[in-house]
Amino acid sequence: MSESNTIEFEDPPLSPRVLAAMRDVPRADFLPQDVRHLADHDGPLPIGEGQTNSQPYTVAIMLTLLDVQPGMRVLDVGAGSGWTTAILANLVGTEGRVIGMERRTGLIEPARRALARHATGTARIERAVPGALGLPHEAPFDRILVSAMASHLPTELVSQLAEGGIMVIPVATTMKRVRRRNDTFDVTNHGQFLFVPLVED
């Protein structure tokens, strides 16, 4: 699989659907008790094990770029607190499916409990398999969201996209939107962001 082109791209306005979904899924429900009073803070918040719940504005940008539609199958890599998984479940509706992947075992059960209050059967959170990226045996996915910073664009994840599918991922501080087209993929760049590192092995 090869990259066909990379261009700088002006970000679209934030999606009203995304903003509505974020209002429907309160951030506070996905935060540890000691930081819930900071839920309205537009910045990352600690959730344990060196991980964070991402800045809401950043989440809104990423989900706008991802352009999730009802009925889609979505993979959420680096689910963390489960907040983005729940927002994605809201966006895909009852006919879609969302799978969140998380490597830190201590985060998984709290995320599952929070998710259960907001997504009925359309979403689940699984423990990521050591040595693998994504969930190849359940691919292809219409959309992939990666909420951790990769050192390079992981073609292993691109290959899990359906034809025409989109992945949004920060790579070496640059937010990238990747669209698969047969055996090639188009990439657009969307500004500079900081995230916790993606575990790539």
Image (cartoon, rainbow, N blue to C red):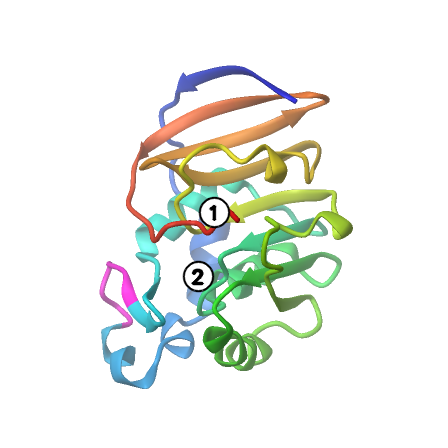
Q: Where is residue 18 in the image (x, y as percent from the top left)?
A: 47, 52
Marked residue nearer the N-terminal end (1 or 2): 2
The amino acid type of the residue labelled 1 equals Leu
Question: Residue 142's mark?
Answer: none
Q: Which residue lies furthest to the top in this view?
A: 4
- 51 over 143 or under it: above or below: below
- 39 over 141 or under it: above or below: below
Viewer-closest of 137 and 174:
137
Whether tag 1 and tag 2 are in contact, CB under 8 A, the answer is yes
Magenta stretch: dominant secondary structure: loop
The amino acid type of the residue labelled 2 equals Met
Magenta highlight range: 39-45
Q: Position of residue 152 (x, y in %)?
A: 44, 33
- Residue designated by label 1: 63
* Secondary element type, mark 1: helix
Crowd class of label 1 (few under 14; some 14 to 19; many from 20; radius 10 Å): many
- Identified at 64% across, 27% down, the residue is 180
- 158 over 140 or under it: above or below: above
- Residue designated by label 2: 22
Looking at the image, is mark 1 or mark 2 nearer the viewer? 1
Q: In this view, does 17 lie to the left or right of 156?
A: left
Q: Where is residue 163 in the image (x, y as percent from the top left)?
A: 73, 30
Is 44 inside the magenta-drawn segment? yes
Is 3 inside the magenta-drawn segment? no
- Identified at 27% across, 60% down, the residue is 44
Q: Is residue 186 left or right of residue 196?
A: right
Question: Mark 1 to mark 2: distance in Å?
Answer: 10 Å
Q: Report which quarter residue 123 is drawn in.
A: bottom right
Which quadrant does the N terminus fall into?
top right
Viewer-closest of 152 and 30:
152
